């Protein structure tokens, strides 16, 4: 069943200087809590420790933003009735938006304690994407972290072809398999450190199978290799890879529709593949070192 779509448009604030201010705004993330209503803000101070709990020990602060936008003056002790009113409102909103029970665990702990979703797209060990497929959201991309995997692209090349074959992630982290300056290139963006492997493409163009294969050689490390029509053409040592999470931006085939996963083609927009792309097949290995290939269920 589809959950209700929450929130409201703020478009008027961009076009109308006299647009009315927001009446109520609820906030909750990783144990931090806040609520705004008509110029007043109540918020908690919660230790930034995953799984700390002890929410009953949180200290609530109160600010009158209408006169103290910088939140310099905590007036919780001066206006206990107002503070209680806003705390009660926070609990009402938390119930309304299905935030309870409170949970301050970080991403890694949530994933480690999660259970496999049998209906989730990540339960598959092989993913095939055909030319023209739309953007794949981050929660549905193949779970390549801390495991061996391969990417096989079935293409037809002509002289001068270039562009992205497949890209996952974005400027903060991810990977991209692309053609540039007559070479097949794979970049692994590890916190903006690029592990790159390149391979020259044959002078005679036509149908081709282009493969990138990552072989896990230890915890969060391995070797990335390129193959052109079955022949090994290059490799790179990768001493560090992502453990639990890479990027929110998802996956694209035949282009890079979000921020560039590598600086190699930054400034070139989506950098679409100009050759003929039939399909991209991502096959996952059985050597996953983390909690498994599945979507976390909280």
Image: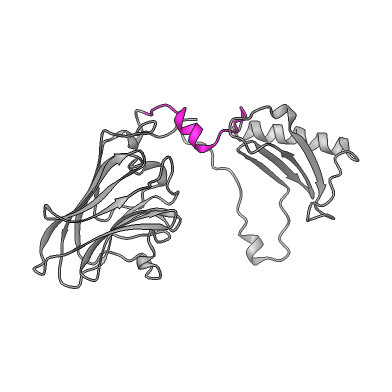
The front one of 236 and 56 is 236
Residue at the spot 64% in from the left edge and 61% down from the top edge: 12
Q: Residue at x 81, y 43 (%)?
A: 62
In the figure, is residue 132 to the left or right of 89? Answer: left
- Residue 128 can be seen in this image: no
Q: In which quarter of the image is residue 104?
A: top right
Position of 108 relative to 206 (above/below): above
Question: Does residue 237 appear in the picture of this structure?
Answer: yes
Q: Is residue 115 magenta?
A: yes
- Considering the image in quadrants, where does the N terminus appear? top left
Provide the residue span drawn in magenta: 100-117
Q: Where is residue 256 in the image (x, y as percent from the top left)?
A: 35, 60
Q: Which residue is drawn at 36% across and 64% down?
A: 270
| For residue 144, side relative to residue 279 (left or right) | right
Magenta-colored segment: predominant secondary structure: loop
User: Looking at the picture, how far across and down is residue 37, in whole percent?
Assistant: 76, 45
In the rendered image, the residue lying farthest to the left is 204
């Amino acid at each position: 069943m589809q959950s209700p779509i929450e929130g409201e448009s703020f478009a008027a604030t961009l076009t109308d200087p006299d647009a009315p201010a927001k009446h109520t705004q609820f906030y909750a993330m990783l144990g931090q809590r806040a609520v705004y209503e008509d110029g007043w803000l109540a918020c908690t101070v919660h230790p930034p420790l995953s799984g700390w709990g002890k929410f009953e020990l949180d200290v609530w602060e109160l600010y009158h933003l209408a006169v103290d936008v910088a939140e310099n003056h905590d007036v919780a002790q001066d206006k206990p009735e107002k503070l209680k009113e806003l705390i009660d409102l926070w609990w009402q909103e938390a119930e309304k938006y299905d935030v309870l029970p409170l949970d301050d665990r970080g991403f890694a702990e949530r994933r480690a304690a999660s259970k496999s979703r049998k209906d989730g797209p990540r339960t598959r060990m092989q993913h095939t994407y055909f030319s023209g497929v739309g953007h794949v959201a981050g929660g549905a991309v193949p779970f390549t972290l801390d495991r061996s995997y391969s990417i096989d692209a079935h293409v037809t090349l002509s002289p001068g072809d270039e562009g992205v074959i497949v890209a996952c992630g974005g400027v903060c982290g991810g990977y991209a398999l692309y053609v540039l300056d007559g070479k097949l290139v794979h970049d692994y963006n590890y916190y903006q450190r690029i592990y790159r492997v390149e391979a020259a493409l044959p002078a005679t163009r036509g149908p081709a199978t282009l493969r990138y294969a990552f072989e896990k050689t230890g915890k969060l490390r391995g070797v990335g290799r390129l193959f052109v029509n079955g022949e090994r053409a290059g490799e790179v040592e990768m001493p560090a890879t992502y453990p639990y999470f890479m990027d929110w931006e998802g996956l694209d085939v035949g282009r890079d529709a979000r921020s560039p996963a590598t600086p190699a083609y930054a400034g070139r927009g989506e950098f679409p593949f100009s050759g003929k792309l039939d399909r991209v097949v991502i096959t996952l290995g059985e050597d996953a070192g983390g909690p498994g290939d599945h979507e976390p269920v909280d």
